[in-house]
C-alpha cells in the first residue's frame, strides 16, 4: 500500500501518441482495474488502455511498457483487447514488464525487449481473510489463475519451457 500511496496523484500514467504510422500507447505504471482505482491509488487503468486500443481502429499499435504489473484480471482484460485488435500490436519492453504487465507482452503480435529490459513472471498471489473454506476457495482461484498464465506464456513462446516451474 505504501507504493500506491506514494504513486497517488503523481500525474497521468497513460500516454497515447498518434502518428502517421500508427499509435503509441505507453503503460508506465502499476496496472489497476478502473479509473476510480487509478484516481485513488494512481496507476494506469485497464479501462484507459482498452479505450486507447479501440480508438486506434485498424492502425498498428506500439505498446511501450515499463510496469511492475498489478491487478491480474485487469491485465487479462487488456491482453484480450490486444488480441482482438485488427492492426498489428508490437510490445516494447522499455524497462520491465512484470507480473500482470507480462500478459500484455504475451498477447502482442511481436515483443521487443530492450537490451536491459526484463519480463518477470510469477505465481498469482493475493491477500485473503476468512475461515478455512474461504482460504481453500482462494487457493483454488490462485491455482486456476496460474494455469491461465501458463497457457498465455505457452501460446506466445511455445511449449519449449516448463512455464509453471519458472513461475516462483
Image: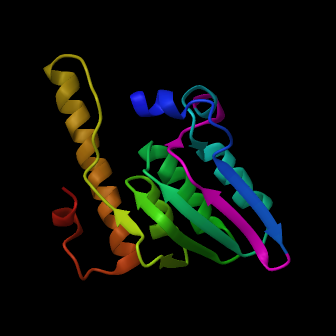
Note whether 114 is above or below 97 in the view shown. below
Q: Nearer the viewer, residue 1 or 70?
A: 1
Number of residue marks: 0
**Residue 133 appears left or right of 127:** left
Q: Is residue 141 above or below residue 149?
A: above
Q: Residue 53 appears at what percent x and percent y?
A: 70, 60
- Per the rendered image, the range of residues in magenta is 20-37
Question: What's the image's color scheme?
Answer: rainbow
**Residue at 28% in and 40% down:** 141
Residue appearing at x 43%, y 34% in the figure:
3
Q: Is residue 32 left or right of residue 147?
A: right
Whether residue 125 is situated above or below residue 69 in the rendered picture: above
Q: Quadrant of residue 109?
A: bottom right
Residue, far right: 20
Q: Quadrant of the N terminus?
A: top left
Quick check: 9 left or right of 112? right
Residue 93 % position (x, y): 50, 69
Q: Quadrant of residue 167?
A: bottom left
> Is 43 situated above or below 27?
above
Percent of width and height locating residue 117: 42, 70
Which of the pair 148/105 is nearer the observer? 105
The quarter of the rendered structure image containing the C terminus is: bottom left
The answer to whether 167 appears left or right of 53 in the picture is: left
> At x 19% / y 72%, what residue is drawn?
162
Q: Is residue 28 magenta?
A: yes
- Residue 54: tell me if it is visible: yes
At horizontal 42% and vertical 52% (from top left) the residue drawn is 100
- Is-magenta flag for residue 89? no
Amino acid at each position: 500500500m505504501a507504493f500506491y500511496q506514494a504513486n497517488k496523484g503523481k500525474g497521468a500514467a497513460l500516454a497515447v501518441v498518434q502518428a502517421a504510422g500508427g499509435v503509441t500507447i505507453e503503460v508506465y505504471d502499476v496496472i489497476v482495474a478502473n479509473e476510480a482505482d487509478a484516481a485513488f491509488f494512481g496507476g494506469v487503468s485497464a479501462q484507459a488502455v482498452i479505450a486507447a486500443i479501440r480508438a486506434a481502429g485498424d492502425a498498428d499499435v506500439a505498446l511501450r511498457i515499463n510496469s511492475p504489473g498489478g491487478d491480474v484480471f485487469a491485465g487479462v482484460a487488456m491482453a484480450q483487447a490486444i488480441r482482438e485488435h485488427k492492426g498489428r500490436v508490437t510490445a516494447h519492453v522499455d524497462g520491465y514488464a512484470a507480473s500482470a504487465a507480462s500478459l500484455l507482452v504475451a498477447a502482442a503480435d511481436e515483443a521487443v525487449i530492450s537490451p536491459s529490459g526484463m519480463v518477470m513472471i510469477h505465481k498469482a498471489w493475493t491477500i485473503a481473510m476468512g475461515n478455512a473454506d474461504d482460504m481453500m476457495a482462494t487457493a483454488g482461484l490462485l491455482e486456476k489463475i496460474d494455469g491461465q498464465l501458463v497457457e498465455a506464456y505457452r501460446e506466445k513462446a511455445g511449449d519449449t519451457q516448463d512455464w509453471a516451474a519458472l513461475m516462483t
